[in-house]
Amino acid sequence: MLRVHFTGLDLARLRLAGDPDVLWETVLSLHRLRDKQGESIYGDWRSETRARLNGETRLLAPLVPSRGYFPDFLTPPEGLDGLESGVAALRATPAERVHEELSRLSTVRTLPAWIRSLGEGDARAFGKLIGALHTYHEAAIAPYWAHIQARIEADRAVRGRALLDGGADALLSSLPPTMRWRAPVLEADYPVDRDLYLNGRGLLLVPSFFCRRTPVALQNPDLTPVLVYPARHMSEPSSCVQTPPRSLGKLVGHTRSAVLGSIGGGCTTSELARRVGVSAASASQHAGVLREAGLVLTLRHGSAVLHTLTPLGAALLRGGHRPPQPSRGRTPLAERSTQATL
């Protein structure tokens, strides 16, 4: 189990990444490519990606084992700014740090000579790594980037609404079931037993399309704390799809009411059409009317279109009632922060 220890200052510095991190998605997708789980979500992606690859997986596999530790330098924070920024930061990692992180891998497996050369700052070895990452990214990530962005944005809509409705308490409580907020500690299912003390540095939450089941944290506790967690997929059961009150159907029409309720935490036009049982054109038209009324926000990522509820749309679905608030009987987190021994 992973236990992330918060103080009041850490809660004030809790952040949610604004975009998917290209290097986290690239590295974690290597895990999904080699396992057989989540077939309904990743099955088509696996078969299409494997047909495009030409040995990149074999090159990268020693650095990114199918399970367990992989070096932190592969996922610098600049990955949030895009692939070029990410690989430039990766290339600039000090050789001492690369050597130290690779040594943790070499204790359980023999690394190829070119990977060992990374720890010596060998320019050709870094060129080989970056070339393999670029080629793998073009085959496995780039063709699906619009879809990945849409899924991440849908997850962000759920977390952002929780934050607006109930603050950091509600945001942390809204995370997937494998993560449990028991103030002032966030517990998570994890391969090893570990405590992470934030020490006032805050925490960056990064939703990920290719992260599955359990979250992932950087191994080095001295790095800026990051917790990558599985974004909710639309094929999974979701409590975010709501049954609208009957009065709403009388007000806006039953089909439009069903469209509003089916948008839930976010969905594409085709997903919305399947949920409501109408054509894609009809779903798009109803979503457009709701958007003009200020109840729905439509975001475009390339060819993908994502619909999410506005706060007004969410309130209308609740019948004007406020969402449940965190228990008032607890001591405020800012006051409890001194109880966490750091």
Image: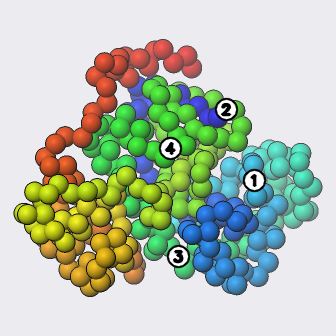
What residue is pinned by disc 2? 194
Residue 39 in view of the camera: yes
> Which mark is on residue 177?
4
Amino acid type, callout 1? Arg
For label 3, count other residues whose C-alpha is less than 10 Å away and answer few (under 14), some (14-19) or many (20+): few
> How far across and down, in percent of the image, does residue 102 sit?
81, 50
Measured in 3D between alpha carbons, the distance from the residue under mark 1 to the one under mark 4, in whole angstroms, is: 21 Å
**Residue 294 percent coordinates (x, y):** 14, 63
Looking at marks 3 and 1 on the same chain, the residue that comes earlier in the sequence is marked by 1
Q: Residue 13's quadrant in the figure?
A: top left
Disc 2 residue type (three-letter): Arg
* Residue 92 visible at all: no
74 sits left or right of 188 in the view: right
Distance from label 2 to label 1 (Cα)?
17 Å
Residue beneath the point at 52% across and 40% down: 179
Q: Nearer the viewer, mark 4 or mark 2?
A: 4
Q: For the residues marked 3 and 4, what is the alpha-carbon distance in whole angstroms?
A: 26 Å
N-term mark: 2 or 3: 3
Query: Which residue bears the numbered disc 1?
Result: 67
The local secondary structure at tag 2 comes to: strand
- For badge 4, the amino acid type reads Pro
Reading the chain from its start, which is encountered first: label 1 or label 4? 1
104 or 32: nearer the viewer: 32
- Closest to the camera, between mark 1 and mark 4, is 4
